[in-house]
Amino acid sequence: MKRILYFLFGLATAAYAQVPPKPYGPIPTQRQLEWHDTEFYGLIHFTPTTYENKEWGYGDADPKIFNPQQFSAEQIVEAAKNGGMRGIVLVAKHHDGFALWPTKTTEYNISKSPFRDGKGDMVREFEEAARKHGLRFGIYCSPWDRNSPAYGSPQYLQIYRDQLRELYTGYGELFMSWHDGANGGDGYYGGAREKRAIDNTVYYDWDNTWTELTRKLQPKANIFSDVGWDVRWVGNEKGVAAETHWATFTPQPPAGVNHAVPGQANYPESPVGHRNGKYWMPAECDVPMRKGWFYHPEEKAKSPEELFTLYLQSVGRGAALDLGLAPDTRGLLDDGDVAVLKALGQKLALTFRENLLRGANLKASNVRGYNSVYGTKNLVDNRKDTYWATDDDFETPHLTVTFNRPVTFDIFDIRENIRLGQRIEKFTIEIEEDGKWKKIHEGTSVGARRLVRFGQPVTAQKLRLNITQCPAAVAISELGLYREAE
Ligand code: FUL
Ligand code: CA
């Protein structure tokens, strides 16, 4: 009898030990998971507006001024790649309405410019360069169009949708469809030169555009806007998420509308998100590398150090960094910008080259079902699908790290297995000093990634991670300890 009981108990634990933790709250789709992996990408603004030295073209610039004689998508994409970016979003049409591809939808397009004798397609050139260098490609097609005579009428919506259709069908798989909330105002509008107001809660009919076009033609494209369907705007153009960043969010529809629409949601909560929000809708942190989104000769690039800090405050908070790149009138990135990107890329690569935790002893206070499938070795195998998990009733475990000898570090890296949702709410990091535990950090949300910068080098032989608040079993994919490169 006893043996049978033991046997049954054994079977039950073995079965339980195979069961992964249940997801907590909303979880990312496959397309969002791939977006999280992209982490850091670029946003390129280059239109006749560049030649006017403006930020918002009025829509009346002569296409003849768009004459980038040395244009090289290769140079720009390579610089982005050297900077550590994994994707490029091209502004295929900005508010000025000038299309960078030979569209059938408007005369106001690249074929009317001297570029490649009117036979050029810049969307194609960027797309090809991006794919050649292994970067993902996405597009931004501005809904506001200050050139179109039809803007403001129902006819324009048709034009805008046709533009999206051309972009969605002509340039391979897109990882993002970027839409901004800038809406209406004054413009050229085919010569009318007037102010046109639209009701952005209904005019663009986003539900149908995104359901009928984007989802069908580009199922891998993450829809971005201030309240996009996949990725939300962080609510500032500084490139930073809040210290606590929840990937979950509940958009609040404006009064009288039953769905939230872009251009409406400058919520104070956008940088933080909503704990236990209704949707998985992580933040994108966009910021130009220079002061403006377009190139202006008098402005200069942020330093590699500033950009590295922005990386820590965006990617390092479980969001993504979208860095604006501005080609100059030659059609190239400024040499100084190229050098800054190279320095940034080197700093990122050198900093994260060697995970000091590899080779250390990692001992957890609990491992799910005593099963090595969920053991701590998963924390340093450089794979997101393998993870350390605890039993369901074990929500506040700790993990003790012991090195052979004292090590010096200043960056801590932790990633949750977000396939199971965002779980951790609070954690602390301690080091052993003179035989006693000393707290060196208190943190909150983790999600896709949390990078902790200690501000000064810390030397220790023993370190402890305490998960102090978590509503479910812990599921951590990766841990790292690094030394910031000069
Ligand atoms: C905003 C636009 O109004 C700016 O011009 C720029 O394109 C920025 C990235 O998005 O909504
Ligand atoms: Ca892993």
Image (spheres, rainbow, N blue to C red):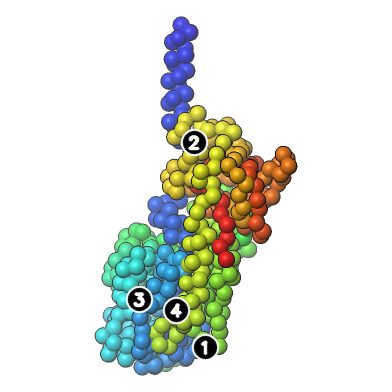
What secondary structure is marked by label 1? loop
Label 4 to label 3: alpha-carbon separation: 16 Å
Badge 1 or badge 2: first in the primary sequence: 1
Q: Which residue is mark 1?
A: 297
Label 1 to label 4: alpha-carbon separation: 15 Å
Q: Is residue 170 left or right of residue 390?
A: left
Badge 1 or badge 3: first in the primary sequence: 3
Badge 4 or badge 3: first in the primary sequence: 4
**Residue positioned 46% across, 6% down in the render:** 1
Q: Which residue is mark 2?
A: 375
Picture coordinates of residue 92 (x, y %)? 38, 76
Is there a contact, CB below 8 Å, between mark 1 and mark 4? no
Badge 1 or badge 4: first in the primary sequence: 4
Dot 4 surroundings within 10 Å: few (below 14), some, or many (20 or more)? many
On the image, which quarter does residue 46 sit in?
bottom left
Dot 3 surroundings within 10 Å: few (below 14), some, or many (20 or more)? some
> Does the beta carbon of the residue at mark 2 sit less than 8 Å from ligand 2?
no
What secondary structure is marked by label 3? helix
Label 3 to label 2: alpha-carbon separation: 44 Å
Picture coordinates of residue 404 (x, y %)? 58, 42
In the rendered structure, which amino acid carries the disc numbered 3? Glu
- Above or below, 89 against 101 in this view is above
Q: Which mark is residue 74?
A: 3
Q: Which residue is mark 4?
A: 45
**Residue positioned 55% across, 88% down in the render:** 298
